[in-house]
Image: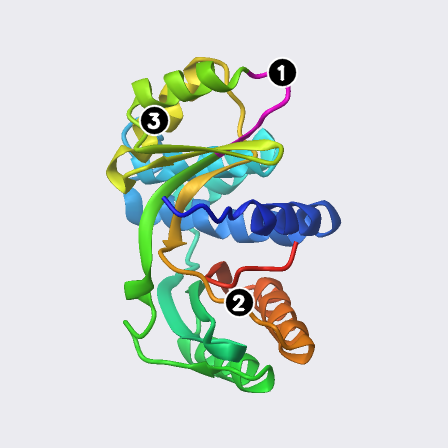
Amino acid sequence: MSGHSKWSNIKRKKEKTDGARAKIFTKIGRELAVAVKDGGGPDPSVNSKLKDCIAKAKANNVPNDNIERIIKKAAGANDTEKYEGITYEGYGPNGVAVIVETLTDNRNRTAGDLRHYFDKFGGNLGTPGCVSFMFSKKGVIVTEKENLNEDKVMEDALEAGASDFLSDDDVFEIYTEPEDFSGVRENLENKGYTFLSAEVEMVPSTYSSIDDEENIIKMQKLLDILDDNDDVQNVWHNWEMPQ
């Protein structure tokens, strides 16, 4: 596993969450609804995709009432909202690799928006596969170090089936193979662990740096405008962000 931590990205997202909770709730709500419709119904005990989405929602402090209401609505016969999952790939300033995962009810609108954002901030939208080979799909579970013993957490994580464990700043990062993620997360939950973040992510194998101040600002603005778009669910990139 690379020595570079993605914690700076999570911290950045967490800070955004604190200031824009409603938008985060909306995005996760859309994921929950899609998980109900496409993943096998409203019962998380038989719908593992929904179970993972619920865990992600709880890690982002979405209230249980909201989660239950979204699931109930999505399972109802009158809910006609239909979202399509589309993944876009492209390059930011300085050739930074960017993957954008979307859930949209209008693919033309979403593609147009994304192409405009990349062009505006010194990048370009590419073809499918142009950057994804630089990433690996991994389960990533992040928990705060506070009051936890590193050896104990590592032992519990590896025993649960984790593939790697990193200690970074004020957090522990636990990595799994995608197919092991649900089981590892559930095992750790049952042992009383709580998470700052828990989801399957695209983890870069190599990182790009940006030295030019103007391009740093452009890259930051590109990430911000992508995060703010309602159709965008996740943004993965290999920029080694300034601390």
Query: Does the residue at mark 2 contact the one at mark 3 (Cβ under 8 Å)?
Result: no
Residue type, mark 2 in image: Ser
**Percent x, y of residue 142:** 50, 34
Q: Residue furthest right?
A: 19
**Percent x, y of residue 228:** 62, 64
CA–CA distance between discs 2 and 1? 34 Å
Reading the image, the residue beneath label 3 is: 184
Residue type, mark 1 in image: Asn
**In the rendered structure, which disc, 3 or 1, sits on the residue that comes first in sequence?**
1
Which is closer to the viewer, label 3 or label 1? Answer: 1
- The magenta-colored residue range is 142-148
- Residue at the spot x=33%, y=40% of the render? 49
Q: Is residue 72 visible?
A: no
Kindly state the secondary structure of the residue where label 1 is placed.
loop
Q: Which mark is residue 27?
A: none
Crowd tier of the residue under label 2, counting other residues whose Cα lies within 10 Å: few below 14, some 14–19, many 20 or above: some
Which is closer to the viewer, label 2 or label 1? Answer: 2
**In the rendered structure, which disc, 2 or 1, sits on the residue that comes first in sequence?**
1
Residue 85 higher or lower than 191, as above or below? below
Kindly state the secondary structure of the residue where label 2 is placed.
loop
Residue type, mark 3 in image: Val
